[in-house]
Image (cartoon, grey):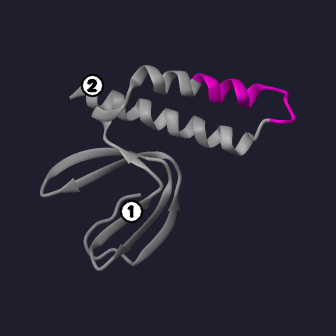
Amino acid sequence: MQFLANHTPYVAALLPDVIKITQDGFNKYAVIAGGFIEFLDNKAIIMADAAEWPEEIDRERAEEELDRARKKLIAKDENVDYLKAKLKLMKATARLKASDILNKK
């Protein structure tokens, strides 16, 4: 989703992902763990459950989290919370994506 000047007011829930923040012609990226976005009067406000900058990400830990989440999702265990595992998979994927963006600069 992209917001340009004078966009219609908008509110939505956000899933774990990388967001791109553009201000004064400069881009910055962050990983959010979910939350909400409100766009009103040419301002976007993101209320995130958690956020981190790409330079704060421990790539090895993110890869381990991704592996654990994948294993839980393919498990045939009735005690696994599949929604929670899916959200952890999304967060780990976003963290790795942000790490890749940082390393390409």
- Up/down of 9 relative to 73, above or below: below
Query: In the rendered structure, which disc, 2 or 1, sits on the residue that comes first in sequence?
Result: 1
Residue type at mark 2?
Asn
Q: Which mark is residue 46?
A: 1
Rendered location of residue 32, percent (x, y): 43, 48
Crowd band around label 1 with a 10 angstrom C-alpha radius: few (<14), some (14–19), many (20+): some
Crowd band around label 2 with a 10 angstrom C-alpha radius: few (<14), some (14–19), many (20+): few
Q: Main secondary structure of the magenta part?
A: helix
Rendered location of residue 15, percent (x, y): 53, 52
Q: Which residue is mark 2?
A: 103
2 and 1 marks in contact (CB < 8 Å):
no
Rendered location of residue 65, percent (x, y): 55, 27
Q: From the viewer's perspective, is 81 left or right of 94?
A: right
Q: Nearer the viewer, residue 20 or 84?
A: 84
Magenta residue span? 67-79
Q: From the viewer's perspective, is 77 left or right of 99?
A: right
Distance in Å between CA atoms under marks 2 and 1: 25 Å
